[in-house]
Amino acid sequence: MGFPHSRILASIASFAAIAALASPAEAHVKWFAPYIVGAPPQPIGMTLANPWFWTGIGLVMVFFLATRIVEKSSAGETILLGMDRLTDPLHQRLDDFVRAVIAAFFIAIFAVGGVYLTPDLKTPAEWVSWTQLLIAALIFLPRTQIFAAAGIIGLWLMALTEYDVFHLLDYLALGIGVAGYLVLEASGNENWRKYRFDVLRWGVAIALMWSSLEKFAYPDWFSPLVEERPFLTFGLPESVFVPMAGVAEFTMGFGLFWTPLIRRLSALALVVIFTSAIYPFGRVELIGHALIMMILVAIVCEHSREVRFMPALKRALAGIPVGLAGTLLLFVLGYWGLHLALYGPEGNVALADKSTHSPDPANPHDGAVDPHAGHDMTMSGDAAAAYMQAMEKMHGPMMAGVANPDPDVAFVLGMLPHHQGAIDMARIVLQFGIDPHNHELAQEIIAAQEREIAEMRAWLAERGLVQP
């Protein structure tokens, strides 16, 4: 008996709504705003106490369960066959498409210059750019693909000389996926070669889920983007939008592991999300996410019905909440646990990477800092205006906070905007200043004030008081 079309449409519509909600936050914040990886992350308990986090989890769970019910019915195979027909022209040349995009990505990175593998990993070494051009050339011949794969992993290892391992883990997952594909695709052993798209899919899924945790660990990293482009949140408060966007990104990454219809619809939604982020964020976004978008398109076009790795769990409806809960627990323990092991409970700003604010390659002076360039009078004027704006933004909420009749509440409500003002000023000097001591001091201020802001917000939440 077929599944009613109204339910199918409702399932897809609910998923599309979640995807639309999350789309603007897909821009990698490290490319566009200052960040300090070594700063202590927000306690995971604050995320678990956030009702919008659980709202997002509930919405996605409904979508996954509804999609799996459809998939198990006769309508499921009908939908998959329809997707097969639509994507068959690309499916027939899927390996050519994947290799071409990988090569194009490395040519684009060469053209940008001064970066390792992705826009936020800066390097002054010119040979790195030429190595990435060589990798692009090696991809076109099966005999040399293994050397291209080795070059990708080698560049990641070289990046460790300038950036620490915690920062690079999501890039490692993606790099291993791409390198593994190149090795398996060139293999003459069909028993190994059949896993090439699985390796790609796992690499991008792990990268997405790991990077999505930034939205829970460091929600303040997204404040500059939201302030600069408020339209991105569709009018939702930042405190609502960021956790739900994080949930959408994590759960759709999780969906790439699952059964054929769930993984193809998850990939399709992610393609829409990443594509929608290109216009507001420009070519940096397109170049930086080119490999991810290519892999997602490949997942949409892949016709395989294979379910590998714990197939019995994935085929059962109960396997969805069990699998999602277990995966979330694994990643949360890994993220917060590894950060604790590397930086300690108070964080370690001294070991953290330098904050960056990456420019659009077509407009290197678009409010961004070139780490190798000097500072002119225009930037100085921009800095002065930024300082004044930060002070004006802080003054009103601080005065309103200290007017509260309860002295304890007044203290917290007054200190929150005061601390945020200090963070805003520190970010401004990171963007426009050139003195190394001031940069180091600014990083320490951001780390300390973010930790104290988290403590004060937790204090308000425990008492049921409205968050400013």
Image (spheres, rainbow, N blue to C red):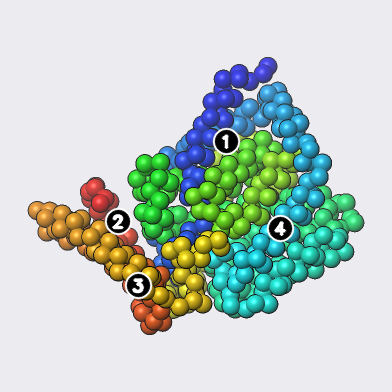
Q: Position of residue 113 (x, y in %)?
A: 62, 70
- 193 left or right of 56 in image: right
The structure residue drawn at horizontal position 58% and vertical position 78%, both measured from the top left corner, is: 124
The structure residue drawn at horizontal position 38% and vertical position 70%, both measured from the top left corner, is: 379
Disc 4 and disc 3 in contact, CB within 8 angstroms: no
Measure how far apart labels 2 and 3 are at the Cα level.
37 Å
Task: Kindly identify which numbered label has been placed on residue 380.
Answer: 3
Q: Tell me which numbered mark, 1 or 3, is placed earlier along the sequence.
A: 1
Write down the residue under mark 1: 64
Residue sticking out furthest to the front: 377
Residue neighbourhood size for the residue with mark 3, other residues' Cα within 10 Å, grouped as few (<14), some (14–19), many (≥20) = few
Q: Nearer the viewer, mark 1 or mark 3?
A: 3
Disc 2 and disc 1 in contact, CB within 8 angstroms: no
Measure how far apart labels 4 and 3 are at the Cα level.
37 Å
Write down the residue under mark 2: 458
Residue neighbourhood size for the residue with mark 4, other residues' Cα within 10 Å, grouped as few (<14), some (14–19), many (≥20) = some
Write down the residue under mark 4: 104
- 175 left or right of 377 in image: right
Q: Quadrant of residue 393?
A: bottom left
Q: Quadrant of residue 413?
A: bottom left
Residue neighbourhood size for the residue with mark 1, other residues' Cα within 10 Å, grouped as few (<14), some (14–19), many (≥20) = many
User: Does dot 3 land on a helix, a strand or a loop?
Assistant: helix
* Residue type, label 1: Phe
Q: Tell me which numbered mark, 2 or 4, is placed earlier along the sequence.
A: 4
**Residue toward you, 426 or 320:** 426
User: Does dot 4 land on a helix, a strand or a loop?
Assistant: helix
Q: Tell me which numbered mark, 4 or 3, is placed earlier along the sequence.
A: 4
* Residue type, label 3: Ser
Residue neighbourhood size for the residue with mark 2, other residues' Cα within 10 Å, grouped as few (<14), some (14–19), many (≥20) = some
Q: Nearer the viewer, mark 2 or mark 3?
A: 3
